[in-house]
Amino acid sequence: MVSQNNCYACARSTGTRFSHLREEEHKAVNKLRSKIRGAIVGAALGDAWGAPVEKLTHDEIKRLYGKIDSLNFEHYIKRSKTHGKGYGRVTDDTLMTLVLCDVYKELKTHLDAYAVFPLIKKIYFEEIWIPEYQKAMPLIERLFYPEKYIFLSNYLASKDPRSAGVGNMVNCGAAMYMTPVGVVNAGDPHRAYNEAIAFASSHQSSYGLEAAGVFAACVAAAFIPNITSMEIVKTAHDLAKDGTKMAIGEIISAAELVKPGDDVVKTFHEVLAKYSPVGDDLRRESENVGAPTEKYIPSRLKSIEELPIALGYIYLYGEDFYKALIEGVNSGRDTDSIGTMIGAILGCLHGVEVISKNDIETLKKANKYDFLKIADDFYSVVKDIHASDEKYFQQVKAVRDKLSIEGERHA
């Protein structure tokens, strides 16, 4: 017979154990929220960091600025404290990311190509604040032409969204806003890859589509407990296909050989020259109209530049958030998208605590967006989707368990 005192002791012991479990669960929840905050705020920070020098070469950045080592820089053409790029203002990379968060909030589930239609409603029929223009307007009016193609191909031309990205200029335009896909698929890079490919097929094709899948996978991998920045890059390489896989593989090999004092920018750009013919020529001059080119056309042998470059700096400096971000942005060319990718992946890996409170406040004031609140709202959406996932996985498991039992009976 168990004494009453022993019962009380047992109850106290159980209560302590349950309290410990609740504490661990609370820490896990806080860690998830911190990583989601880190991904969303980090993406915005990287975008704003690279915005003033987008399209400049590494040498031009050095000549004009020395080094972009804070948000407090003006744009190299439009030198304005309030308008255009610079001083912490984000670009379309971030605004498309926020709209995609809203699509998840509306649908409350995973996305496929048909989720492009609520996206189109948001970018064309709704107005949002555009920090560069300092006014509210439909986002489509700010987008670059390949992103406007979403509206043209899926809505005006009424293509099947699963192939509507075919015919677009192949670029990083879909990859740049895939952070939310990685967040929703936290800890599951394979599913993040597949979901991003399915959704972004309405926008991109070929290696532009591939980059969207791989970037989303990297963000999802950054949620895995105790994963390292190098392991995230290797996950990207494992999942990538064709030219994207080859480019990431060569960037990893080059990064492993880097020694103090080496010209990392030159090394990485030499690798990417095999896979991206764009190089330093990001400005579209009138004399180039009609000139034959292999830029931005579909190919199984090519890769966008932004993702492998971002992964290269993550591989080298991934344990130091700001070092990776600063070096990546100062490498030049498509600096805001490179910054977005580094910021999202490493912000998620290390959690929002790695980002300076001053930078978070600067982003809020410069853009009139509270990125922490946006991330917290998205955290609630993600938790609901994860709960639905768990219910679905349990249903599938129950069916398979039953099939296994019945199979054994009749064996």
Image (cartoon, helix red, strand yellow):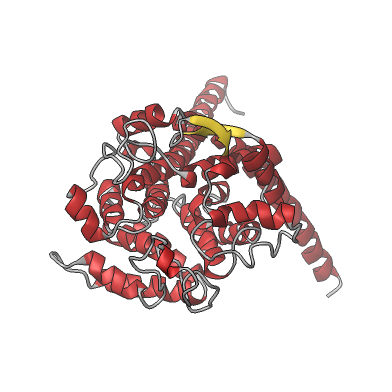
**Left-right relation of 138 to 337:** right
Provide residue 330's location: percent of width, then percent of height: 26, 54
- The number of numbered discs placed on residues in the rendered structure image is 0
**Residue 59: which quarter of the image?**
bottom left
Which quadrant of the figure contains the C terminus? bottom right
- In the image, residue 74 sits, relative to residue 334, either above or below, namely above
- In the image, residue 270 sits, relative to residue 15, either above or below, namely below
- Judge by depth and name the residue closer to the eye, 214 or 74: 74
Q: Residue at x 71, y 62 (%)?
A: 162
| Residue 204 visible in this rendered orientation of the protein | yes
| Residue 234 visible in this rendered orientation of the protein | no
Provide residue 301's location: percent of width, then percent of height: 48, 79
Provide residue 106's location: percent of width, then percent of height: 68, 37
- Judge by depth and name the residue closer to the eye, 252 or 402: 252
**Left-right relation of 250 to 140:** left
Q: Residue at x 74, y 58 (%)?
A: 157
Which quadrant of the figure contains the N terminus? top right
Specify the farthest residue to the front. 287
Provide residue 121's location: percent of width, then percent of height: 69, 41
